[in-house]
Image (cartoon, grey):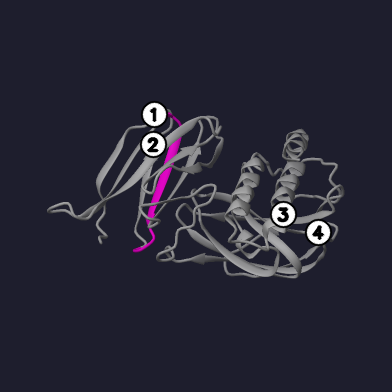
């Protein structure tokens, strides 16, 4: 089944690929939404997210997916938007009986956003990378629901996609908000996020190639303190990072950040102490061999 979906995905045209990616995710939510705490189900859901990568949103593209004209409009922070899933501007995949609406918004690197929705039907929503279709955050913790909200810290200053989908039609309301700082004590591991040093530090990465391709690093946890990121292939590791508790170090108690890379593309690493909200950003310039990071003054936020 998974291979069939992947084959369909990569043969599809741009807008089709975004719909297929979202449909795969929605199907996973339908399958696993009733048991969000089930770890095997969550791992399977995460794998489906990985296999949905690569969708590109081009509103002007022609497509055989019925009634799919691209995004419905632009979301503004703090302004609720009412929509109708199933109208003439909604995307529809007749083979799956799946409806989806897509909206866009622009945000800044390090900005934390909250997406909330209410609907007259059981729905699934996601924030996706505009260039690749990568699902960055979703309402999976709510399962299929008529209302849900979730948060995500943007990794780059760029345009993003919000999708809402269902196997039925009806009215809905989307509200996008900008959240000040990071929520204390909260780090949730997902496809693009590492939670290091006993889950206290949130680590995310983004990359940009010389040709302008950009996207989030895909996270792989190694130990409680250490993790990896890959960009183009799961077998091709690009960066490794660890956060070390040096709070007992004499004279200068700190949390240290060490990182290294096997790439020369532009890389931005964002490390957030979820206990204090403090953030450190590390950037490797374009066309430059990744220089080792040995920041022993990173976070003066002990204990």
Q: Name the residue under label 2.
A: 284
**Horizontal side of residue 41 vs 200, given as left or right:** right
Mark-to-mark CA distance, 2 and 3:
36 Å
Which of marks 4 and 1 precedes in the sequence? 4
Q: How far apart are marks 4 and 2 (CA)?
A: 43 Å
Residue sitting at 63 percent across and 48 percent down? 44
Could you tell which of marks 3 and 4 lies nearer the N-terminus?
Answer: 3
Range of magenta residues: 262-276
Could you tell me how far apart the alpha carbons at marks 1 and 4 are, in whole angstroms? 47 Å
Tag nearer the camera, 3 or 1: 3
283 in magenta: no
Q: Residue 26, which numbered label?
A: 3
Tag 3 secondary structure: helix
Q: Can residue 81 be seen in this view?
A: no
The answer to whether mark 2 and mark 1 are in CB contact below 8 A is yes
How dense is the environment of label 2, judged by Cα within 10 Å: few (below 14), some, or many (20 and up)?
Answer: many
Q: Residue 167 carries which label?
A: 4
Residue at point 45% right, 33% down?
Answer: 238
Badge 3 local density, few (<14 within 10 Å), some, or many (20+)?
many
Query: Is mark 3 in CB contact (under 8 Å) with mark 4?
Result: yes
In the image, which disc is placed on residue 288? 1
From the image, which quarter does the C terminus lie in?
A: bottom left
Question: Where residue 192 sits in the image (x, y, percent)?
Answer: 52, 47
Q: Tell me if mark 4 has few (under 14), some (14-19) or many (20+) residues whose alpha carbon lies within 10 angstroms of its own.
A: many
Q: Can residue 88 be seen in this view?
A: yes
Give the alpha-carbon distance from disc 3 to disc 1, as whole Å.
39 Å
> Can you say whether 91 is above or below 61 in the image?
below
**Quarter of image, res 100:** bottom right
């Amino acid at each position: 089944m998974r291979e069939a979906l992947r084959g369909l995905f990569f043969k599809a045209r741009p807008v089709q690929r975004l719909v297929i990616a979202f449909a795969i995710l929605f199907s996973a939510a339908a399958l696993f939404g009733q048991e969000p705490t089930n770890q095997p189900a969550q791992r399977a859901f995460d794998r489906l997210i990985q296999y949905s990568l690569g969708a590109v949103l081009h509103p002007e593209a022609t497509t055989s997916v019925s009634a799919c004209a691209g995004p419905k409009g632009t979301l503004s922070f703090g302004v609720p938007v009412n929509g109708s899933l199933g109208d003439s501007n909604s995307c529809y995949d007749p083979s799956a009986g799946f409806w989806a609406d897509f909206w866009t918004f622009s945000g800044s690197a390090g900005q934390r956003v909250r997406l909330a929705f209410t609907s007259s039907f059981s729905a699934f929503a996601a924030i996706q990378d505009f260039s690749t279709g990568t699902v960055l955050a979703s309402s999976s913790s709510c399962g299929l629901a008529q209302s849900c909200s979730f948060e995500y810290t943007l990794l780059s200053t760029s345009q993003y996609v919000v999708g809402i989908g269902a196997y039925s039609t009806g009215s809905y309301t989307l509200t996008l908000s900008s959240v000040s700082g990071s929520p204390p004590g909260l780090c949730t591991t997902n496809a693009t996020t590492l939670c290091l040093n006993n889950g206290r530090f949130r680590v995310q990465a983004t990359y940009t190639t010389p040709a302008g391709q950009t996207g989030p690093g895909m996270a792989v946890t190694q130990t409680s303190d250490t993790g990896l990121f890959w960009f183009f292939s799961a077998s091709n590791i690009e960066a490794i990072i660890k956060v070390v508790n040096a709070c007992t170090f004499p004279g200068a108690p700190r949390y240290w950040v060490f990182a290294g890379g096997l790439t020369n593309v532009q890389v931005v690493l964002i490390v957030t102490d979820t206990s204090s909200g403090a953030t450190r950003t590390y950037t490797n310039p374009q066309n430059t061999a990744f220089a080792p990071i040995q920041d022993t003054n990173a976070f003066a936020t002990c204990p």
